[in-house]
Amino acid sequence: QVRLVESGGGSVQAGGSLTLSCIVSGYASNIPCLAWFRQAPGKERESVLIISNTGAKETADSVQGRLSISQDGGSNTLNVEMINLKPEDTAMYYCAAGQIGGAYCFQPSYVFKYWGQGTQVTVSS
């Protein structure tokens, strides 16, 4: 059974930093597509960062230059480093995994099959 567990959330002041981690277990090989999503209260869930098994990455404009994604080599651990955090970054952050990789990861219709429970990030002004 595939399982995703996020960690690293917390409360910081604006301008602060956090690192979120997602550990994926139960998958026989490298996950083809991994991503971080977030959902703020009253808002729709949005894709923040995506990385495919080819190493290609996609970053949402709203976090460009402030959030970066990395994957531990040879392991199914996905990290996101967050710097210069803003109050509008406050949200529940979710790790997600999909079974088809490559360019498909970045299509708006892509379906991420596996999801973690989320980790809360709160940024105060």
Image: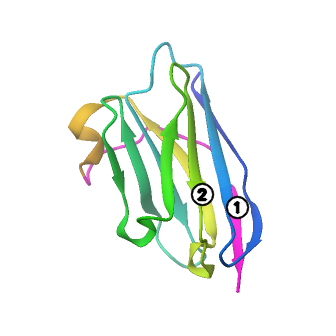
Question: What residue is shown with label 1?
Answer: 120
Q: Earlier along the polypeptide chain: callout 1 or callout 2?
A: 2
Using the image, determine if residue 63 lies above or below residue 102.
below
Query: Which region is colored magenta?
Result: 108-125
Q: Point out the residue furthest to the right here.
A: 11
Is 68 in the magenta?
no
- Which residue corresponds to the image point at 70% horizontal and 86% vertical from the top-left? 125
- Left or right: 106 in relation to 15: left
Picture colour scheme: rainbow
Q: Residue at x 51, y 59 (%)?
A: 67
Rounded to the nearest angstrom, the CA distance separating label 1 from label 2 is 6 Å
Where in the figure is residue 57, as x and y percent of width and height?
34, 45
- Compared across the picture, whether 58 is left or right of 9 comes to left
Q: Residues within 10 Å of mark 2 (few under 14, many from 20)?
A: many
Identify the residue under disc 2.
93
Amino acid residing under circle 2 = Tyr
Seen in the picture, residue 91 relative to 50 is either above or below; the reply is below
Identify the secondary structure beneath mark 2. strand
Q: What residue type is labelled 1?
A: Gln
Give the image quarter of residue 89.
bottom right
Quarter of the figure with residue 11 = bottom right
> Looking at the rendering, in which quadrant would you find the N terminus?
top right
Crowding at dot 1, Cα within 10 Å, few <14 / some 14-19 / many 20+, comes out as: many
Q: In the image, what residue occupies the spot 55% across and 66% down?
A: 39
Q: Is mark 1 on a helix, strand or loop?
A: strand
